[in-house]
Amino acid sequence: MIQKRLIGAITVRQGLAVQSFGYRRWLPLGDPVVLAWNLDRWGADEILVTVTDRGGAGPDLALLDRLAAAGLSTPLIYGGGIRGPADAVAVVNRGADRVTVDQLLHDAPGEVAGIAAALGAQAVIAALPVAATPEGLAWRDYRDGADRAPGLAMLDLFGAGHVSEALLIDWQHEGVPGAFEAALVPAFPLHDVPLILFGGLGEPEQTARLLAEPRVAAVAVGNMLAWREHAVQTLKAALPGARLRPARFAGAAA
């Protein structure tokens, strides 16, 4: 039986891991490497690190070097500042297993196809901040705050096999436990694309319902996993029917 995944999400801003609220307000949490090390030893299935303030500066290779030096055994997903295939290859060469792309989906879908050609589509995730509206799915561009329907050029990346999964980000409820908008799942127009859900997740009952959806391959949880010791084990224990890998209870990363 295919198992689903619980992804520990770390949002980084100005070099610090932050607690994020709708990507509009942030509270500092500390060193992102320490948070990643905790997620690794507690048994997260993947770790997602998103650096939100890179702009055109490229990926944060210094942070990736520090994460690599921490000796993490959990697969690492990195997003932030990736401008094309060369950046994506540099990220993977620094120890990441997969990359997320966001702005490229708006600006240069052809560059995303180039990343897939360099790394394989299994290494490419489309990060989509979205909201459900009466007219359908609204896809946000953080840079200008505009909401648009998902573009055909972006959707064609899935049909052409250049992107493996869609990371649906409920940006409106990000940072509010239990508030993820379940209507985002049926609203996503490509029904054969595996989905990762993020934003307002972590409440066990709702998380279990979403993981039971056939299209949902994983959920990503951020803020609530940063505050308490063994938060990953506690959440997995509260989701006994969710087909997650068992949590680890070792006291050290080894």
Image (cartoon, rainbow, N blue to C red):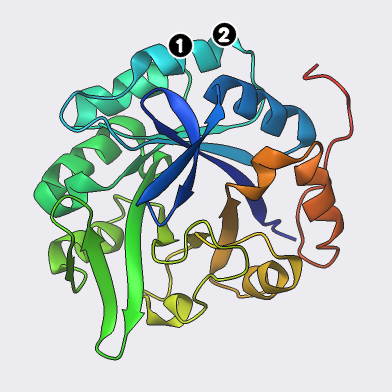
- In this rendering, the answer to whether 133 lies above or below 128 is below
Q: Secondary structure at mark 2?
A: helix
The image's mark for residue 69 is 2
For disc 2, the neighbor class at 10 Å (few under 14, some 14 to 19, many from 20) is few
Question: Is 106 on the left or on the right of 159, as rendered?
Answer: left
Q: Which three-letter amino acid code belongs to the residue tagged 2? A: Ala
Find the distance from the CA under tag 1 to the CA under tag 2. Answer: 6 Å
Q: Residue at x 82, y 45 (%)?
A: 233
Q: Residue at x 22, y 24 (%)?
A: 58
Q: Quadrant of residue 177?
A: bottom right
* Residue nearer the viewer, 79 or 97: 79
Horizontal and vertical percent for residue 15? 41, 22
Horizontal and vertical percent for residue 129? 33, 60
Q: Residue at x 25, y 32 (%)?
A: 82
The image's mark for residue 65 is 1
Q: Quadrant of residue 83?
A: top left
